[in-house]
Image (cartoon, helix red, strand yellow):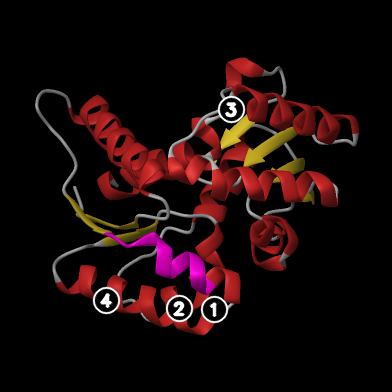
Amino acid sequence: MRTLGLIGGMSWESTATYYRLINQHTRAALGGLHSAPILLHSVDFAPIEAMQRAQDWQRAADTLVTIARNLEHHGAELILLCTNTMHIVADTLEAELDVPFLHLADATARALRRAGHTHVGLLGTRFTMEQPFYRDRLARHGLSVRVPDAPDREAIDDAIYAELCRGHVNDATRQRFLAIIDHLRTAGAEAVVLGCTEIGLLVQPSDTDVPLFDTTAIHAAEAVRAALA
């Protein structure tokens, strides 16, 4: 099994889920006491979030490239960026690596296409929902992407940074997210992408009959398949 290099901490709440899921999938595949060989660099999220707010993507890219190269230098054979939003610099990151980079949006798109969906809703931070880097990546796979309206996008973004990234899971917020998911279905979405790694901490498939695609779970499962291939 190839050694996985994880760039996490954005936020650590979802990085902990990555670690658990990757090891659970590895044990299911290999049995016994097997677990995944992982190198994890968990960043201090506060400086990264400040770069996001300032939209200083070049500085963010430089920071993550340095981390990724260090993971590669220490033996990582496959790199994962454990955050949807920071895939805004994924092309720069991938270009600087000599080992494969598993793009989260590609993994998600493949899962959607395997399930037969072509029209999807997308939830995430305002950067993920409003800037083209993520929607365009999904569109390369033949997916039509719809995002919530502006007030709902603001509510989702606020909940991610003020609540979920801080480990706060509130039922009132869950109900707001479920209402937004229903609106997307009414607007034609066949499924909804939970395009922030923290949203799966709040909303579960059992909460709605709309098919939900949790990017954290998808990314972790595909990472194990790729590492074992």
> Residue, x 59% and y 15% (percent of image)?
206
Crowd rating for badge 4 (residues with CA inside 10 Å; few <14, some 14–19, many 20+): some
Q: Which residue is mark 4?
A: 69
Total marks drawn?
4
Mark 3 or mark 4: name the one nearer the start of the chain. Answer: 4
Return the x and y of residue 227 as percentages of the image width and height. Answer: 28, 49
Mark toward the viewer: 4 or 2: 2
Q: Is residue 136 above or below residue 225?
A: below
The one nearer the camera, 163 or 102, is 163
The amino acid on which the numbered mark 4 sits, given as a three-letter code, is Arg
The amino acid on which the numbered mark 3 sits, given as a three-letter code, is Val
Return the x and y of residue 42 as percentages of the image width and height. Answer: 28, 58
> Residue, x 30% and y 71% (percent of image)?
68
- Spatial CA span between label 1 and label 3: 29 Å
> Residue, x 34% and y 55% (percent of image)?
8
Question: Can you tell which quarter of the image residue 187 is in?
Answer: top right
Q: Which mark is residue 203?
A: 3
Q: Is mark 1 in CB contact (under 8 Å) with mark 2?
A: yes
Mark 1 or mark 3: name the one nearer the start of the chain. Answer: 1
Give, as a single range, the part of the protein colored magenta: 42-51
Q: Which residue is mark 2?
A: 61
Q: Which residue is mark 1?
A: 57
For residue 186, say whether it is visible: yes
